[in-house]
Image: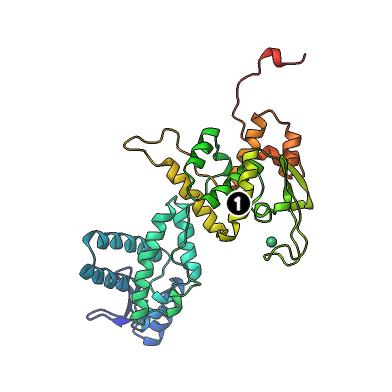
């Protein structure tokens, strides 16, 4: 708020608008103050700027300048681009003060960028730059240190996983996948899931006593049977079920039980292993690219693949549903991936 030389009345200068705003042409300071307060109320975020606070755009400029001294031109350019984007967005919402940056605001930014169809990695890079600038703001005592604390998450977006049904795993895919599955323990785990369609939790709780000739029985465990569940463990829906398996699957189950102690079965770790094996299987040999790359899939997709392949092998859906431990065949239907638009041959029709 200030008076301009040679002009009547009080003015305000709003940093991000880069123009003088008349406060009603009054000479009275109190009246001007009231008008200024009104203006601030209208445009959220500039309250602190009134008392000589450094604005976000000034902080961002400082950040860019600083980057120029110790980064490559490419990095500086990237930073410039990211900060400009963030700043435009902030200014669009009337935010000019570093103090106004908080968790909901950052979350809003993520959501709105996501809504624009921007990729997660792109947004993460923007947030990275923003965080860098906020670090500087904290250093300059323009923002509170809590803006960098855990509850304001600047960088943590992941590309959404593909829809499960997109992962149509063929026999060829799976054979290639297991050829390239290097780590024997994890390989055995994946092989068991493919051969039994057991759920994640069920494989973890499988014991030596559950292995039979030609079958694996999914069995609830009494209290004390495992460290993770002191009150005992039960399958989903308390359904004991006997799953028919091949010799290879049984062998994999034995191998998994043997290796289990040394494996890290943390969900994230298992996911990473699965993706590493997949990447290895999709890696081009020499200059030739893999012809039919294995699509992105999850551990649960192996369960879906099992169901689809069992159907292809001629097993009835009611039985498949039972082996999967589903209460309802409708659930099983959602698992299956049937790509078959052809009419059946007339001789297969009973009447
Ligand atoms: Zn347990």
| Mark 1 residue crowding within 10 angstroms, few (<14) / some (14–19) / many (20+) | many
User: For the point 33% across and 64% down, which residue is it?
Assistant: 83
Compared across the picture, whether 347 is left or right of 155 comes to right
Q: Is residue 275 visible?
A: yes
Q: Is 226 placed above or below 248 here?
A: below
Residue at which label 1 appears: 256
Ligand 1 is found in the corner quadrant, namely bottom right
Please name whichever residue, 80 or 224, is drawn nearer the observer in this view of the structure. 224
Q: Quadrant of the N terminus?
A: bottom left
Q: Quadrant of the C terminus?
A: top right
Pick the front one: 56 or 52: 56
Residue at (78% x, 49% y) in the render: 239
Position above or below: 184 against 342: below
Percent position of residue 144, x then y: 42, 80
- Residue 338 at x, y = what percent? 62, 31
Residue 291, how many percent across, how many down? 42, 33
Secondary structure under badge 1? helix
Residue 26 in which image quadrant: bottom left
* Residue at screen point 61% across, 54% down: 258
Which residue is painted at 70% across and 39% down in the image?
A: 332
Viewer-proximal residue among 242 and 116: 242
Quarter of the figure with residue 120: bottom left
Q: Is residue 62 above or below residue 335?
A: below
Query: Does label 1 point to a residue whose CB lies under 8 Å from ligand 1?
Result: no
Horizontal and vertical percent for residue 116?
A: 44, 51
């Amino acid at each position: 708020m200030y008076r301009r030389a040679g002009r009547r009345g009080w003015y305000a200068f709003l940093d991000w608008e880069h123009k003088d705003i008349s406060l009603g042409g009054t000479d009275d300071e109190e009246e001007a103050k009231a008008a200024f307060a009104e203006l601030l109320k209208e445009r959220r975020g500039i309250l602190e700027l009134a008392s000589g606070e450094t604005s976000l755009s000034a902080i961002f400029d400082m950040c860019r300048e600083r980057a120029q001294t110790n980064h490559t031109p490419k990095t500086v350019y990237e930073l410039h681009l990211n900060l400009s984007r963030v700043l435009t967005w902030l200014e669009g919402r009337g935010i000019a003060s570093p103090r106004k940056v908080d968790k909901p605001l950052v979350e809003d930014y993520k959501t709105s960028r996501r809504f624009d169809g921007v990729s997660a990695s792109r947004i993460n890079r923007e947030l990275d730059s923003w965080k860098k600038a906020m670090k500087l703001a904290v250093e300059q005592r323009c923002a509170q240190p809590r803006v960098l604390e855990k509850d304001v998450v600047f960088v943590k977006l992941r590309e959404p996983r593909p829809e499960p049904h997109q992962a149509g795993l063929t026999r060829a895919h799976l054979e290639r996948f297991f050829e390239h599955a290097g780590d024997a323990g994890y390989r055995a785990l994946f092989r068991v899931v493919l051969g039994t369609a057991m759920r994640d939790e069920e494989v973890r709780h499988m014991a030596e006593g559950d292995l039979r000739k030609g079958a694996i029985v999914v069995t609830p465990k009494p209290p004390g049977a495992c460290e993770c569940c002191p009150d005992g463990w039960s399958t989903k829906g308390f359904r004991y079920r006997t799953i028919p398996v091949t010799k290879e699957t049984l062998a994999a189950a034995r191998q998994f039980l043997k290796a289990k102690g040394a494996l890290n079965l943390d969900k994230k770790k298992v996911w990473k292993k699965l993706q590493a094996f997949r990447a290895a299987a999709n890696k081009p040999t020499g200059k030739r690219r893999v012809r039919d790359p294995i699509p992105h899939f999850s551990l649960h997709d192996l369960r879906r693949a099992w169901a689809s392949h069992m159907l292809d092998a001629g097993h009835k859906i009611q039985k498949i549903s039972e082996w999967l431990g589903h209460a309802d065949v409708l659930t099983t239907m959602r698992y299956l991936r049937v790509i078959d638009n052809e009419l059946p041959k007339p001789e297969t029709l009973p009447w």
